[in-house]
């Protein structure tokens, strides 16, 4: 099991990838994309650049909860995040423990997000 400091560091890496995907989403909107976009896997693995096809609707649903991230299957870290959704193209994980408050604080959409019960900022 990772200690709190390690969990927070890994989450910061994932938050950075979430920011990249927010830019991809923003650009896709500029070009009128309303169907499917390709986002970067938001896992904590160094150098992972797996692209995941995600519908714009699903992307927005996941982004509504700041502790959730898109990952390629098998890229999750047990004890740090929990798989909350599985699709043929990607999984969605929810951060737990010391990593959850970091994900919440660093959420670029914090002005209109929901915080799941039991997660303290």
Image: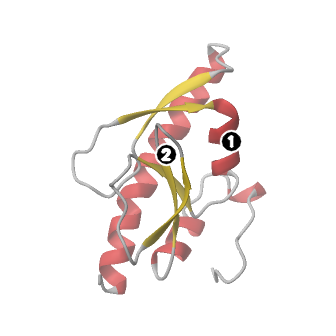
Q: Residues within 10 Å of mark 2 (few under 14, many from 20)?
A: some
Location of the N terminus by quadrant is: bottom left
Q: Position of residue 102 (x, y in %)?
A: 50, 71
- Asked if residue 39 is positioned above or below residue 120 in the image, the reply reads above
From the viewer's perspective, tell me whether residue 81 is left or right of residue 54: left
Q: Position of residue 115 (x, y in %)?
A: 71, 70
Q: Residue at x 74, y 59 (%)?
A: 113
Looking at the picture, tell me which residue is in the foreground, 106 or 64: 64
CA gap, disc 2 and disc 1: 14 Å
Q: Residue at x 77, y 55 (%)?
A: 112
Res 27 quadrant in image:
top right
Residue at the extreme top of the image, as rendered: 31
Q: Residue at x 52, y 34 (%)?
A: 23
Q: Position of residue 94 (x, y in %)?
A: 54, 65
Name the colour scheme: secondary structure
- Asked if residue 48 is positioned above or below residue 24 in the image, the reply reads below
Res 49 quadrant in image:
top left
Location of the C terminus by quadrant is: bottom right
In the image, which is nearer the foreground, mark 2 or mark 1? 1
Q: Residue at x 64, y 83 (%)?
A: 120
Residue at the extreme front of the image, as rendered: 88
From the viewer's perspective, tell me whether residue 98 is left or right of residue 13: right
Q: Secondary structure at mark 1?
A: helix
From the viewer's perspective, tell me whether residue 9 is left or right of residue 91: left
Looking at the picture, tell me which residue is in the foreground, 16 or 57: 57
Q: Which residue is mark 1?
A: 60
Q: Secondary structure at mark 2?
A: helix
Q: Which residue is mark 2?
A: 19
Q: Position of residue 21 (x, y in %)?
A: 49, 38
Q: Which mark is residue 76?
A: none
Of the numbered discs 2 and 1, the one sitting upstream in the chain is 2
Q: Residues within 10 Å of mark 1 (few under 14, many from 20)?
A: few
């Amino acid at each position: 099991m990772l200690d709190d400091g390690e969990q927070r560091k890994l989450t910061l890496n994932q938050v950075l990838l979430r920011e990249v995907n927010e830019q991809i989403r923003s650009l896709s909107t500029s070009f009128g994309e309303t169907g499917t976009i390709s986002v970067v896997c938001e896992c904590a693995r160094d150098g992972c650049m797996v692209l995941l096809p995600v519908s714009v609707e699903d992307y927005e649903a996941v982004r509504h909860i700041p502790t959730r991230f898109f990952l390629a299957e098998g890229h999750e870290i047990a004890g740090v995040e929990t798989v909350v959704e599985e699709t043929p193209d990607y999984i969605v994980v929810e951060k737990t423990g010391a990593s959850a408050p970091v994900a919440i604080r660093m959420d670029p959409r914090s002005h209109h997000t929901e915080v799941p019960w039991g997660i303290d900022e």
